[in-house]
Amino acid sequence: MSLLYSGPSLAVLHEEYAARGRVDPDAQLTSSSRLVVDVPADRVWAVMADLRAWPSWASRIRILELGDVRPGASFRWRLNGVPLRSRFAVVEPQRELTWTGTFLGRYRAVDRHVLEPLEGGRTRITVEESLAGPLLPLFYREPMLRANHERWLSDLARAVA
């Protein structure tokens, strides 16, 4: 792992990774977390895809600018006070919500949220992310990324219950 790795350009990251259901495997930080909830995928999707409502249930998130939730559409938001610029890559109802994003102008992420319907009206939610940028591991580490995912999943589970 190189401390100076920036990953592919944002355009390549968006088109060749995120839009194809992949994160950057070479990024300094990658994380994946899963949770099964006792509600159907359509209910999870309805809550997860309503970004305007995220601040009402998701810890430490604020939506700053949002148009349509569709592939190619951009949005701006804050997570833990950090401003992010993101663009949807995959919007597949009841299946996947994926975007690329940048922060501080030099750090790039792919965020995937995948829903898998299970027997009995349950749903497995998987959150997967890659994060890359120069010197990133000096101030942000995988346990911090995982903690954000675990908090997100916990908040989402409460919101869909």
Image (tube, grey):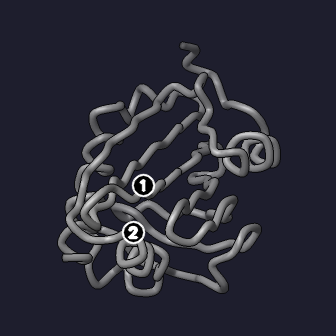
Dot 2, how many residues are within 10 Å of its Cα: few (below 14), some (14-19), or many (20+)?
Answer: many
Q: Is residue 59 visible?
A: no
| Front one among 68 and 109 | 68
Amino acid type of the residue tagged 2 in the rendering: Ala
- Side (left or right) of 122 relative to 43: left
Look at the image and tell me in which quarter the N terminus lies.
Answer: top right
Q: Secondary structure at mark 2?
A: helix
Residue 27, by quadrant, is: top right
What is the spatial separation of the Cα atoms under label 2 and label 1, in whole angstroms? 7 Å
Whichever of labels 2 and 1 marks the residue nearer the N terminus, that label is 2
Which circle marks residue 116 in the picture? Answer: 1
Amino acid type of the residue tagged 1 in the rendering: Glu
Image point (76%, 68%), residue name: 72
| Front one among 156 and 64 | 156
**CB-based contact (under 8 Å), mark 2 and mark 1:** yes
Dot 1, how many residues are within 10 Å of its Cα: few (below 14), some (14-19), or many (20+)?
Answer: some
| Front one among 56 and 65 | 56
Indicate whether 28 appears above or below 48. above
Indicate whether 103 appears above or below 22. below
| Residue with the mark numbered 2 | 41
Q: Secondary structure at mark 1?
A: strand
- Side (left or right) of 133 relative to 33: right
Where residue 112 appears, x then y in whole percent? 52, 51
| Front one among 123 and 63 | 123
Where residue 35 appears, x then y in whole percent? 26, 51
